[in-house]
Image (cartoon, rainbow, N blue to C red):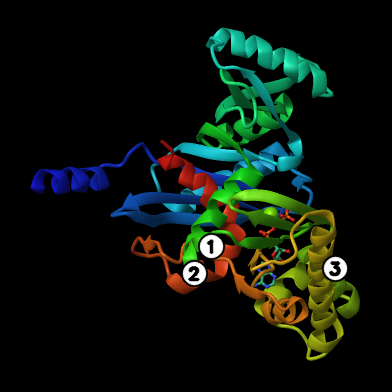
Amino acid sequence: MLQERFNELIKMLTPRSKPLLGLDISSSAVKMIELSQSGGGFQVEHYATEPLPKDAVVEGNLADLEVVSDAVKRAWRRMGTRTRGAAMALPTSAVITRKVVMPAAASEDDLEIQVESEANQYIPFTLEEVNLDFQILGPAPDGAEGEVEVLIAASRKDKVEDRVAAAQAAGLRVHVMDVEAYATQAAVELIQKRLPGGGRKQVLALVDLGATTMRVTMFHEGVQVYLREQQVGGNTLTNEIARHFSISAEEAETAKRQGNLPESYLPEILQPFRENIAVEIARAHQFFFTSTPFSHVDHIILAGGCAGMPGLEEAVSTRTQVNTFIANPFARMTLAPGIKQRQLAADAPALLTACGLALRSFDE
Ligand SMILES: Nc1ncnc2c1ncn2[C@@H]1O[C@H](COP(=O)(O)OP(=O)(O)OP(=O)(O)O)[C@@H](O)[C@H]1O
Ligand SMILES: [Mg+2]
């Protein structure tokens, strides 16, 4: 008994693998987090966000590699860590995934050949242009005995290479290349576990309101069952502010974040903007219901840098009549000295992907 407890303790105290920095490069910023395992949970060791100028990253493309890698370097320095291994992600749109069924007895080499020939059939690029990866998921769902289900993922090589180059130029080594949607989902699962009943058998809506894109994803039992994307986000609001008050976009962005705008901002700009967002979220729910067997949503999780915008949470819950809250995957984590709870809670909604990537350190 004692020995058993001792073994448990040792397991908890020894890190299972070396830490990786979760490194998320999005259109508005470079985001970096390092987690460690402590007790049965996690600790936030370091994190940093480094803003990117407009057009450095466009629709997931690193348009200006030098500017991006400089931002990565600055973020890493500010973190004050010695860890140089990183987990990064490709934009979900840059990755094609397919599930196929294959014979279980196939050797690794045979599988590789089969994967290539399968991939050839549905990937609109030549095999020289893509990185191909596969993972055996388990026995085929309704297949015959002796067959396994295999997940094939193909991505354009140049997208992978750009990310690796940006990290390398900043002195980091990329150990994991994930997909944004999967990394984000890992962070959502942490949030889900804290819901009543562990969020099981429930439908969760994740609303990611970033700088350029609003993404509404529905999850059921850990599976993504619906996705709607729209080109609206924080930049839309910033541009409206700039136009309305005749100031530059940079000034508008700063004033927006500091809440430092004339009184007319609230009724004339902010209120209509967040109402419009709430309407679009309600609409996404309707599309979800008409295109799937689902007929209700249990919780809405607001994420992305705009999640904490004054009044948004209430506007969304009023419009949809669904319990709505702001994402914080770190709520149950301990914090290293120097990390402030309140600041982290405010930054958390924009850090979901980076958090999910940092969690890859502890994958078996
Ligand atoms: N305190 C704040 N008040 C209002 N808006 C904010 C605040 N902080 C950040 N934002 C907005 O959040 C947006 C950035 O969010 P986020 O980091 O999630 O975007 P992103 O992931 O870079 O963009 P995208 O997902 O569209 O590529 C910016 O438009 C920014 O103005
Ligand atoms: Mg984003």
| Foreground residue among 184 and 30 | 184
| 282 relative to 174, above or below | below
In what element is the residue under mark 2? Answer: helix
Disc ID at residue 196: 2
Q: Locate residue 214: give its quadrant.
A: bottom right
Q: Locate residue 136: give its quadrant.
A: top right
Cα distance, mark 3 to mark 2? 40 Å
One can see residue 191 in this view: no
| Foreground residue among 170 and 223 | 223
> Which of the four quarters of the rendered structure image does ligand 1 lie in?
bottom right
Residue found 59% across the figure and 53% down from its top: 221
Residue under label 3, please give it.
Answer: 239
What amino acid is labelled 3 in the image?
Answer: Asn
* Lower position in the chain sequence, tag 3 or tag 2: 2
Disc ID at residue 293: none
Mark 2 Cα-neighbour bin, 10 Å: few <14, some 14–19, many ≥20: few
Q: Locate residue 362: give its quadrant.
A: top left
In what element is the residue under mark 3? Answer: helix
What amino acid is labelled 1 in the image?
Answer: Gly
In what element is the residue under mark 1? Answer: helix
- Residue 310: horizontal and vertical position, in percent? 68, 80
Disc ID at residue 199: 1
From this viewpoint, which residue is outermost toward the bottom? Answer: 263
Residue found 65% across the figure and 55% down from its top: 219
One can see residue 279 in this view: yes
CB of mark 3 within 8 Å of CB of mark 2?
no
Cα distance, mark 1 to mark 3? 38 Å
- Residue 71: horizontal and vertical position, in percent? 61, 47
**Mark toward the viewer: 3 or 2:** 2
